[in-house]
Amino acid sequence: MEEIEKQSRYLFVYDEACDLSTKVTVKIVKQPIRTALDEMFRGGNIVYRIDGSNIVLSRKRNDGAASSRNDNRPRNVKGKVVGPDGNPIVGATVVVKGTALGTSTAADGSYAVQIPVSVSEPVLSISFIGYEAVEMPVGERTAIDVTLKESSVGMDEVVVIGYGTVSKTDMTGSVANVRMSDIQDTPVLSVDQALQGRIAGADIMSTTGEPGATTSIRI
């Protein structure tokens, strides 16, 4: 299942009623996804169905039909995630709160997730970088459209940079990073000499031609 998720656009969705502890060995090369799934679950107690980009797994009853807890079927919830301008947001994360079940929005902002029967009061958590995350109670709805608001970054918030974090109030200019692995074998006598020519916008030069002379660093 992990390999299929890595090599395709599909995501497995299932609830606690499914017993996934059985190990199987299959060899499949350049075959349709249904061929792979048929081989994986043949003779077992799991049945599958493909719903958009989700592969929904259910436990098989004695009569061969799919069932889940209390003989209820998981509920599908679909919708669309857009920004304040109405344009679709691609790659937004939609997760069933309290579970590992989730998906990402497609190119048109659409999504589809399955609510397992084990979740009594489902809530969808929707988030995307640069927008405020929202939580939407599902209730009895099967279609939920979401409009995300752009987040306002406060001056006291932390900004992640290439090699650490810094307060936004201290972020007054560009940040450059020189890795020690790049300069550790350089035949120089000091750190400032090792940094010469490696930082854009920084002129590092010796004040005189004498060995051990002080260095001038200009930004």
Image: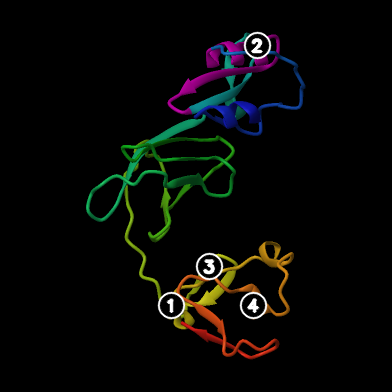
Q: Is residue 92 visible?
A: yes
Q: Which percent across, then down, holds residue 215? A: 60, 87
The vertical placement of 47 against 81, above or below, is: above
Q: Identify residue type, mark 3.
A: Ile
Q: Which residue is mark 1?
A: 173
Q: Badge 1: how crowded within 10 Å, few (<14), some, or many (20+)?
A: few
Q: Which residues are magenta?
A: 32-53
Q: Nearer the viewer, mark 3 or mark 2?
A: 3
Towards the viewer: 184 or 142: 184
Specify the amino acid type for callout 1. Gly
Residue assigned mark 2: 39
- Classify mark 4: helix, strand or loop: helix
| Local SS, label 3 | strand
Dot 4, how many residues are within 10 Å of its Cα: few (below 14), some (14-19), or many (20+)?
A: some
What residue is pinned by disc 4?
193
Q: Do callouts 3 and 1 mark residues in contact (Cβ within 8 Å)? A: no
Q: Amino acid at mark 4?
A: Gln
**Alpha-carbon distance for marks 4 and 3?**
25 Å
Marks 3 and 1 sit apart, C-alpha to C-alpha, by 12 Å
Lower position in the chain sequence, tag 4 or tag 3 = 3
Of the numbered discs 1 and 4, the one sitting upstream in the chain is 1
Mark 2 touching mark 1, by CB under 8 A? no
Relative horizontal placement of residue 88, taking residue 53 as reference (left or right)? left
The Cα–Cα distance between marks 1 and 4, rounded to whole angstroms, is 23 Å
